[in-house]
Image (cartoon, rainbow, N blue to C red):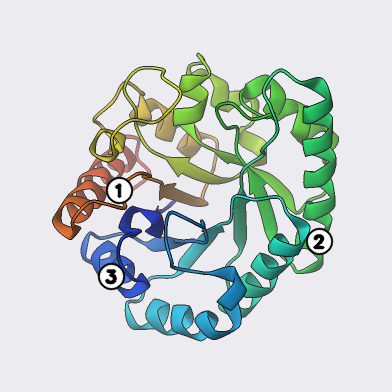
Amino acid sequence: MKLGANSVLFGKFDMETSFRWLKACGYDGLEISAIDGMSQHLVLDQWEELAPVVKELSERYELPVLAMEQPRRDPERMEKAFQAAVEIGIPVINCGPGGESGDEDSLKEVIESLGTLSERAGHYGLTLCVKAHVGAAIYNTETSLRALEAITCPAFGLDMDPSHIHRANENPVEAISAVVDRIRHVHIRDCKGRERGPGKPENQANGRGDIDLLGYIRVLHESGYTGPVDLEVIGAKEYELPACVAIAAEARGHMQACLQACGAR
């Protein structure tokens, strides 16, 4: 498994700050944020001028870009994400499902949309991943399986995020077994309780919350998963740099200890 972190943690700062400090914290790679409103990192309307910058930073800091997070299913926007990914050399695009929980028509629309986008991802030689998300049409293991059963395109996979599964009142360690063969990316963070949001950024650091992340990583390892495990901490845009670095370092130390404990490193 490759340990990375989403640059959205450093949303207040420029891309180089993300690369510099994630490298200093010992990460194996970086997930680039293309999330409007949370960062100004990979701004997709400017991807052609930003792609060389990302590539240069990745080479300079010896930190490969493991994935991109672009949350919207808008076809035009996703097309830009695909083109940027090819140019930079990013293998995985992570998006959110959107839609509404408990609405069958919404779930069907989301699955159809993801199926179409997956075909486009395949055209570019990329993998499109979606994760179960609190409040969205795909929000738990059952709805994740509905999508995985309906979308057979090999360019489609699951981005497994234990914090959302936990907040869907499931046990992520038990839930992962049902979908592990289709996981192509992992977003990881901790959280306290089962409220709608993930909590304060510092409480999203691995080891701060209620999720059995050691057990979760053990199942990934025993199932043969070797892809990216990217920390995704949101809400830190107003935090100063030392706080962001502390969160990144603490979470990476916990992930490394988990890998060592289960024999993955």
Q: Nearer the viewer, mark 1 or mark 2?
A: 1
> Can you give x and y, in whole percent of width and height, for residue 52 in the image?
50, 86
Q: In this image, 74 relative to 256: left or right?
A: right
**Is disc 3 placed on a helix, strand or loop?**
helix
Residue type at tag 1: Ala
Which one is nearer the viewer's eye here, 186 or 72?
Answer: 72
Which element carries disc 1, helix, strand or loop? loop
Where on the picture, by quarter, is residue 133? top right
Looking at the image, residue 7 sits to the left or right of residue 173; the answer is left
Amino acid carrying mark 3 in the image: Thr
* Residue type for callout 2: Arg
Of the numbered discs in the image, which one, if any, rests on residue 120? 2
* Disc 2, SS: helix
Place of residue 185 in the rendered image (x, y in percent of width and height, measured from the top left)? 55, 47
Q: Nearer the viewer, mark 3 or mark 2?
A: 3
Q: CA distance from mark 3 to mark 1?
A: 14 Å
Circle 3/circle 2 CB separation < 8 Å: no
Q: Is residue 249 above or below residue 98?
A: below
Q: Residue at x 53, y 69 (%)?
A: 43
- Horizontal and vertical percent position of residue 223: 55, 35
User: Residue 11's image quarter?
Assistant: bottom left
Q: Cα distance, mark 1 to mark 2?
A: 33 Å
Q: Earlier in the sequence, mark 3 or mark 1?
A: 3
Residue lying farthest to the top in this orientation:
169
* Vertical position of residue 212 compared to residue 201: above or below: above
Reading the image, the residue beneath label 1 is: 236
